[in-house]
Amino acid sequence: MADMDGSLWVFGYGSLIWDPGFPVAEQSIGRVDGWHRSFCMRSIHHRGTADAPGLVLALDRADGAACTGVAFRVAPGAEAETIATLRDRELISSAYLETTLPVATSAGAIMALAYVIDPDHVQYCGGLPLEEQARIIAAASGGRGPNRDYLWSTTAHLAALGVSDPDLEWLADRVRQLI
């Protein structure tokens, strides 16, 4: 999971962008190819419940796709603690798979820890129409708060970084209309 110089990098594409939860030494806009950011995971803990699941973002594999997010270099000495913290947060169910992906940054390619969706997991729901996603996000709430706040925070932080995500932008506007 460490890059060539021994640094641990983490790729954030959703809530990690605005709430990494670990000490960051540096960050850079980065892109992973062959994956897209998608509300393709039913959330039964953080942004929904088992009875009323919300939706959270995951990297979903797709030919020709690319996802722009943030590559974070973990502060030296905090690597083991960071991995433990991320596993507690991201692997609360087994819907995410922990992997290492190549990330293209302005400084060159790095290898980064990333959490991608397991398409065989019961919480996977790839391909939901955007309108259905909006209705779920507008209504759901879980242990970390309303699903809509997760959407709005992610969309706002991507915009502040100059990263456009038309699907998320459409969803953010539609959820505002629904509530």
Image (spheres, helix red, strand yellow):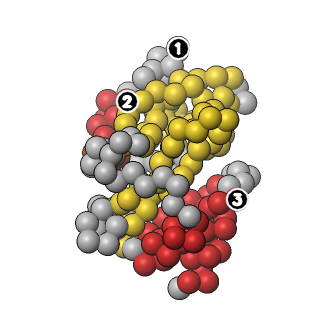
Residue type highlighted by circle 2: Glu
On screen, residue 126 above or below 3: below
Residue placed most toward the observer, 53 or 100? 53
Helix, strand or loop at mark 2? helix
Q: Which residue is mark 3?
A: 166
Which of label 2 and label 3 is nearer to you? 3
On screen, residue 7 above or below 167: above
Indicate left or right for 150 with 143 as reference.
right
Q: Earlier in the sequence, mark 3 or mark 1?
A: 1
Q: Which residue is mark 2?
A: 79
Instruction: Please name the residue shown 65% across and 60% down the image.
Output: 167
What x and y, as percent, mark residue 160?
69, 57
What x and y, as percent, mark residue 44?
30, 62
Residue type highlighted by circle 1: Met
Which of label 3 and label 1 is nearer to you? 3
Q: CA distance from mark 2 to mark 1?
A: 15 Å
Q: Earlier in the sequence, mark 2 or mark 1?
A: 1
Instruction: Please name the residue shown 62% across and 35% down the image.
Output: 63
Residue placed most toward the observer, 73 or 155? 155
